[in-house]
Amino acid sequence: MAAIPSIACIGVIGKNNNPLHISIFPSDPTNLPIRTSVQFSLVLSSTLDIFEARSKVNLTSGGGLSGDYGLLHAIDERLAAYGFETNTGVKFVVVVDMRGRGIGEIGKGMGSSGLGLREGEMKVVFRALQASYIKLLQNPFYDPDEHSPPMGRGGKKITCKRFAEDLRRIGESWRPGAGTT
């Protein structure tokens, strides 16, 4: 059966490189994630050096921060990490399972052309993530400073149910070429 890429994990990392939220999505027919939450946490942490290196290159080349870092790195033959940084320093990392879901599992009418990702395929995901994060910031009960305190002082994880539901919806609905709902 042909398969298309799917999102395996979405991570939100605070401006001080502290983990704020992680959502994991099953990819295979057994409905189990392909990595544990600890393994995905390590994958998310491994992207921080790439964000830092690329932001230094962007600043020294006079380009500034564009936000979309694109492919951060291929983790193995199956997983690839993509990144985006907001202007406030919050980072979104999306880990894509290139084997993903079987076409039969997601409905009819999908072609088998989604065997890889094209340039900019993740932009719709990052726009949706940023919109969800902006909605979270507009919540008067959410204090971003208590979630990203100065280095070495811990910080709270994002526990807002609506934000978690938004990320779940984004991760489950994304298909290459189709966007999110």
Image: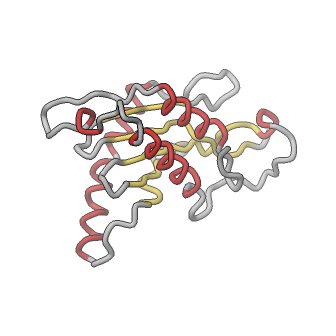
Residue drawn at x 77%, y 43% is: 2
Toward the right, the furthest residue is 108
Q: Quadrant of residue 120?
A: bottom right
Q: Is residue 161 above or below residue 151?
A: above
Q: Position of residue 86 (x, y in %)?
A: 37, 54
Toward the bottom, the furthest residue is 62
Question: In the image, is 59 to the left or to the right of 164?
Answer: left
Q: Please give the count of numbered marks on the rendered protein.
A: 0
Residue drawn at x 40%, y 61% is: 67
Q: Is residue 160 above or below residue 63?
A: above
Q: Position of residue 8 (x, y in %)?
A: 55, 36
Question: In the image, is 179 to the left or to the right of 103?
Answer: left
Residue 81 versus residue 175: which sits nearer the camera? 175
Question: In the image, is 15 to the left or to the right of 104?
Answer: left
Question: In the image, is 152 to the left or to the right of 31?
Answer: left
Q: Position of residue 109 (x, y in %)?
A: 86, 47
Residue drawn at x 51%, y 30% is: 162
Q: Position of residue 127 (x, y in %)?
A: 53, 54
Residue 103 versus residue 136: which sits nearer the camera? 136
Toward the front, the furthest residue is 140
Residue drawn at x 33%, y 48% is: 90
Q: Is residue 179 above or below residue 68?
A: above
Q: Which quadrant of the figure contains the N terminus?
A: top right
Render colour scheme: secondary structure
Q: Which quadrant of the figure contains the C terminus?
A: top right
